[in-house]
Amino acid sequence: MIRASSMLSALVIFDLEFTAWPDSMAGHWLAPGQFKEVVQIGAVRLETESLAVTASFDCLVKPRINPVLSDYFQRLTGITNARLAKEGVDFETAYRRFVAFAHGDTIAAFGHDEWVLDDNVRLYGLKNPPARPPFLELRGWFDRHGVNPKRLHSCDIGPLLGVPFEGQIHDALCDARSIAGGMTVLIKRGAKLTL
């Protein structure tokens, strides 16, 4: 168990893309048949001493309940049904790969993406899934270090702190890199990364 004052030597910063429709955010995904099914997991490993990103993870996931992505989702993320059919894997495979990538290190997201992972494990009734690593919610961390997280998305963090965004916004890996870039700026300014 990590104590509240423990410094982290490495952090796996991740982001998710999940099924969405034009009205899903406003309706909190409560409309009949709407679920936050994971479509992409993107992550980077940030070594906190060197501030180097030493590894990355990118996996497309085929939703089971809503297997056809909405036009809204495709425009938002750039992930197409054709690409998903070619590159996507089942959630259980993706989840196991992500947990293996984390290798027991703390995972962190800009918001409670761990809840979405946990909900997908329950939604699909996975048998004996690997334990999810410890989680650090980064919206509060950024807020404590002078970045008000209200109305911000993962893709906004890097550019807000002077780190140019590279790639497609609302692509989970690109967004994870944006978060890591913003964190690096704040750590260089003296912010501590603790649990």
Image (spheres, grey):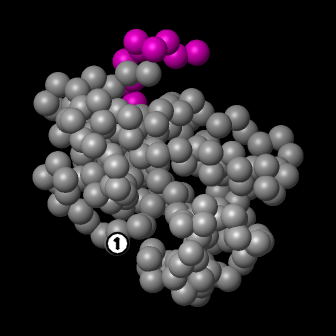
Q: Is the magenta stretch mostly helix, strand or loop?
A: loop
The magenta-colored residue range is: 1-10
| Residue name at image x 71 percent, y 54 percent | 120
124 displayed left or right of 68? right
Q: Where is residue 11 in the image (x, y as percent from the top left)?
A: 41, 34
| Residue name at image x 85 percent, y 52 percent | 125
Query: Looking at the image, which residue sits at the far front?
Result: 27
Closest to the observer: 107 or 94? 107
18 displayed left or right of 9? right
Q: Position of residue 81 (x, y in %)?
A: 59, 84
19 displayed left or right of 106? right
Does residue 86 appear anywhere in the picture? no
**Residue assigned mark 1:** 168
- The stretch drawn in magenta includes residue 7: yes
Give the class, few, some or many, for how many residues have Cα within 10 Å of label 1's Cα (few <14, many ≥20).
Answer: some
| Residue name at image x 69 percent, y 45 percent | 118
Check disc 1 and give the amino acid type. Gln
Q: Is mark 1 on a helix, strand or loop?
A: loop
